[in-house]
Image (cartoon, grey):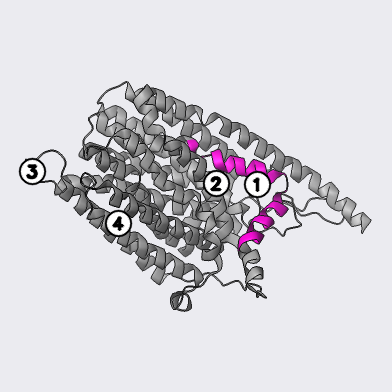
Amino acid sequence: MSDKTPSTPAAAPPDVPPQVPAASPAGNTAAAAPQPGWRAVWRVYLEPATLRMLLLGFSAGLPLLLVFGTLSFWLREAGIDRTTIGYLSWVGLAYGVKWAWAPLVDRLPIPLLTRWLGRRRSWLLLSQALIMGALVCMALTDPRLALEPMVWCALAVAFGSATQDIALDAYRIESADVERQAALAASYQTGYRIAMIWSGAGALWIAAWAEVAGAGGYQHGAWRTAYLAMAGSMLLGVATVLCSPEPQRRALAPSRNAADWLKGALIEPFADFLRRYGKQALLILALIAMYRISDVVMGIMANPFYVDMGYTKDEVATVTKIYGVVMTLVGAFVGGALAMRLGVMRVLMLGAVLSAGSNLLFAWLATAGHDLGALIVVISADNLASGIASAAFIAYLSSLTNVNYSATQYALFSSMMLLLPKALAGYSGRFVDAFGYADFFTATALLGLPVLLLIGLASRSKTAAAQVAPAQAAIDSIAR
């Protein structure tokens, strides 16, 4: 694959293979677009669409840790055992099956709201309202007294968050051309990571600040204050949606009947992907399913690990906020810039190597005891690797979609990304109980090895397609 061209077209017609350069009648490949200079690459981060994506990324990232990492810290402090916490991570499977209702988000109007805001923004606003309401319910529930209501509230947050992701991914893809998707992905990821730090470190800070001095032990009131603050933080996303323009609406072909509508909404988006990528589709889906497996499986046990290692809420929050946020921002922007300059597949490989390597640092940390300096090093390296990998991966997923089915196809890809990792993560607590943290983190690093092979195969298949296409185009031209 040439490192001067985007990895794949965003909306190639069904009869045009992916990664195929345009061919002249003589069969020669058209001249590649000039490589952008570094000044032009960095200037794209100041464009209005990119800045909007920063704020909307914050809205998307806020709920995630509130039903995973921060919630696991809360549950562990409340005395819930690690095995139960691991099983509760299956709440995240809502993100892995969001493709099931993505066609509705892609096509179904919401009464009154869609006429006022448009299709994308109306679904964004509705999902944000659901997230806020469910977070308030979580805040008012004490898991030590009743765990089941907390589970249902967490499911509602996950469902609302997954729905917001569907609408927001479509909004992002439709807001800029393919050349700017890497920058939008980096900006989105930066906002996403800032929100994760706020919902992780910020929530811990607020909970620590709200504790009654001298009371000691678990205090539900402190966590109630933290989660109410998180619910209020969703207002930033609401304000951004209300102030943002709706992407240019694409006319949908009228449906003759209900069966025709279901075919266009449910079947055609997946059929289009298979037509465009053919045999490569299975390889692409395998890469998507495996790419973030090291991070996702490891992440469920990170906060219980901090608790069991004796780190306080203030220590975890401070290290994550100061060192983690800096390295996350650096990683996201560097990943986005490198993807535009060097090509997405190369940065995907780099991100996969760094992500697996950072898990080995956690294995080392498990043997170091309560060492704040070591925690700073590990969290900084982990966030840098995650920022680079995520920016490139989002750009890669965006480039695979046909803009006519952007919400449904991107939901399929991002669901595939989470389904297998979340399923495995449910057993993470049992693994830690049986083998310990050091072996667990080492095992999650080893899970990343097949990813390197898949990236290599995907890159090779794209290069082969690019080499074969000009000759095939010339043959077709002569035949006609």
Residue appearing at x 40%, y 47% in the figure: 91
Spatial distance from mark 1 to mark 4, Cα to Cα? 45 Å
Spatial distance from mark 2 to mark 4, Cα to Cα? 26 Å
Location of mark 1 (residue) = 4
Location of mark 4 (residue) = 135
Kind of residue indicated by mark 3: Ala
Nearest to N terminus: mark 1 or mark 2: 1
Residue 213's tag is 3
Q: Is residue 440 above or below residue 400?
A: above
Span colored in magenta: 266-293
x then y, percent, for residue 263: 65, 64
Spatial distance from mark 3 to mark 4, Cα to Cα? 26 Å
Kind of residue indicated by mark 4: Leu
Nearest to N terminus: mark 1 or mark 3: 1
Residue 271 position by quadrant: bottom right
Nearest to N terminus: mark 1 or mark 4: 1
Location of mark 2 (residue) = 416
Q: In this view, does 313 lie above or below 156?
A: above
Closest to the camera, between mark 3 and mark 4, is 4
